[in-house]
């Protein structure tokens, strides 16, 4: 029997470790009611879960909804069914980014990928480099409004212009490279 | 003497500098030896896991493998590192296939992981291993009269790695009281400050911070204490942004709990990184330093 559109997306999400709770949802809305950023989501947290189950792949993955997740885990500890919505939203973010969906109305994907690039380059987070990359990618002019915050951090010795060079940096990139090969094989 | 493998995390060396120095400063009088994990790398933070769930786990696993060699508990003062390393550890133990893939990758750097590390947050170690009784015996300058709002933030207590209640935690309250200070009611004590979305969704995060500050001040707090470097940076470095957006004048300092402990232990302010705090704490702490 040919698989329906709904069951394919549900399977895609449900077979990922962070997405396996999606089938347990009873649409009680506790996640939405607990979410400090719910009013900013394009579709509410519980709405997104319903859409995953209805197979609305493009609609979900191109939306800015899950990118508003703050990872506060309130929904996760309150969900009466153990859905673990926070992890589910991370799975959706990952799928959206791996499949090249560009959500409008959110700069969070650019911020996250700036984070990952600095980690891969330096082995650790280098905040100044991360911010620089992020503002160049989004809106360089906004960085001017953030200058006072940056200067305060700098004058209080909390921001360095150059990343710390650590030995583990190369090991980490070799490990990531190898992991990708192993994962692609399986 | 108690020995731990210590994982400072990236923030404790940069935006959360006050956390890094104060954690090491209070370890000494408490007879804790925090042995920094040699050559540690990023924990595989939330931003990483959001873009690539399993790759973030291999990033965490390098640190877990390094820690396993020491045979000690892995202690971090950072709430996000605590969550990320705990989650990776849990996943690896639950999923033998992932563990095998991760080990194949770690092998290129002559590392392997068997899943035996116990990941712990410094606050938990202070409360459970050292204990409040011992902590209170180290107090040289009791913080009598100081009104404190203990702020847990999210990732120290949620999702729930067995440390404290995920919604109404109390351990930090007791820790602050053991220093002689008074804890004020703070109903939003485990609510979100906006986290890293301060960068991409500033309006959202500033609004959450305004609520936290209003709640602490409204209950009479003279300062907020937190163990989390991201919460501290948001509430401290972005204070001017909150005040200008909402036409408020919040001026209460946000200290790391380890800084407050250090003050009570009589440790010099410069060894606690008090100068790295942007909202100055001098006035509030004047009676104690």
Image (cartoon, rainbow, N blue to C red):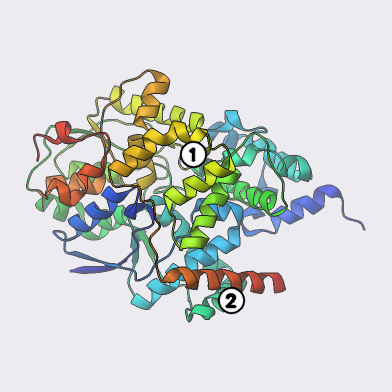
The disc numbered 2 marks a residue on which chain? Answer: B
Give the left or right position of residue A12, taking residue A30 as reference. Answer: right
Q: Position of residue B266 (x, y in %)?
A: 9, 48
- The mark closer to the camera, 1 or 2, is 1
> Which chain does tag 1 point to?
B
Residue B100, label in figure:
2
- Please name whichever residue, A184 or B237, is drawn nearer the observer in this view of the structure: B237
Return the mark for residue B57: none
Neighbor class of circle 1 (other Cα within 10 Å; few <14, some 14-19, many 20+) is: some
Res B271 seen here:
yes
**Horizontal arrangement in the rendering, residue A52 relative to residue B68 (left or right):** right
Q: Quadrant of residue B85?
A: bottom left
Q: Secondary structure under badge 1?
A: helix
The mark total stands at 2
Q: Is residue A178 above or below residue A150?
A: below
Q: Which residue is drawn at the image coordinates 37% and 33% (left, top)? A: A148
Along the line of sight, which residue is nearer the eye, A135 or A8? A135
Q: Circle 1 sits on which residue? A: B199
Instruction: Give the position of the C terminus of chain A as an image quadrant.
Output: bottom right
Distance from Cα at disc 1 to Cα at disc 2? 36 Å
Q: Residue A15: x and y, percent? A: 70, 59
Q: Residue at x 10, y 53 (%)?
A: B138
Task: Where is residue B216? Give x, y as percent.
Answer: 31, 28
With respect to residue B235, does A83 lie above or below?
below
């Amino acid at each position: 029997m040919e698989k329906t559109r709904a069951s394919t997306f549900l399977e895609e999400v449900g077979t990922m470790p962070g997405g396996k709770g999606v089938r347990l949802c009873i649409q009680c809305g506790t996640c939405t009611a607990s979410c400090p950023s719910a009013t900013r989501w394009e579709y509410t947290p519980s709405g997104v879960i319903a859409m995953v189950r209805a197979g609305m792949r493009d609609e979900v993955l191109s939306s800015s909804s899950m990118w508003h997740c703050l990872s506060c885990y309130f929904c996760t500890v309150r969900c009466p069914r153990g859905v673990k919505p926070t992890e589910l939203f991370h799975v959706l973010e990952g799928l959206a980014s791996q499949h090249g969906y560009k959500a409008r109305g959110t700069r969070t994907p650019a911020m996250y990928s700036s984070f990952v690039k600095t980690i891969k380059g330096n082995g650790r987070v280098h905040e100044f480099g991360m911010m620089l990359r992020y503002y160049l990618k989004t809106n360089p002019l906004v960085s001017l409004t953030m200058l006072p915050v940056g200067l305060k951090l700098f004058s209080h010795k909390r921001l360095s212009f150059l990343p710390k060079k650590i030995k583990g940096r190369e090991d980490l990139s070799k490990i990531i490279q190898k992991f990708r090969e192993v994962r692609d094989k399986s | 003497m108690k020995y731990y493998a210590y994982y400072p995390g990236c923030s404790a060396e940069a935006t959360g500098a006050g956390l890094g120095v104060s954690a090491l400063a209070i370890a000494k009088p408490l007879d804790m030896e925090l042995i920094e994990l040699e050559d540690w790398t990023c924990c595989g933070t939330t931003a990483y896991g959001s873009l690539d769930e399993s790759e973030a786990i291999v990033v965490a696993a390098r640190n877990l493998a390094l820690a396993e060699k020491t045979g000690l508990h892995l202690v971090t003062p950072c709430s996000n590192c605590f969550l990320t390393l705990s989650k990776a550890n849990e996943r690896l133990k639950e999923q033998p296939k992932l563990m095998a893939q991760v080990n194949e990758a770690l092998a290129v750097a002559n590392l392997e992981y068997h899943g035996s590390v116990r990941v712990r947050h410094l606050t938990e170690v202070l409360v459970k291993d050292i204990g409040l009784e011992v902590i209170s015996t180290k107090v040289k300058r009791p913080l009598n009269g100081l009104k404190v709002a203990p702020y847990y933030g999210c990732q120290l207590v949620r999702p729930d790695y067995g440390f404290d209640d995920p919604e109404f935690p109390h351990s930090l309250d007791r820790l602050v009281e053991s220093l002689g200070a008074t804890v004020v009611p703070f109903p939003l004590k485990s609510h979100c400050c906006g986290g890293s979305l301060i960068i991409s969704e500033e309006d959202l995060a500033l609004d959450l911070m305004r609520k936290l500050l209003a709640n602490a001040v409204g209950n009479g707090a003279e300062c907020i204490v937190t163990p989390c470097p991201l919460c501290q940076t948001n509430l401290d470095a972005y204070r001017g942004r909150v005040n200008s957006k909402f036409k408020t004048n919040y001026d209460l300092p946000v200290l790391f709990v380890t800084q407050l402990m250090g003050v009570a232990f009589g440790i010099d302010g410069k060894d606690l990184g008090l100068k790295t705090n942007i909202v100055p704490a001098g006035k509030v702490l004047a009676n104690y330093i």
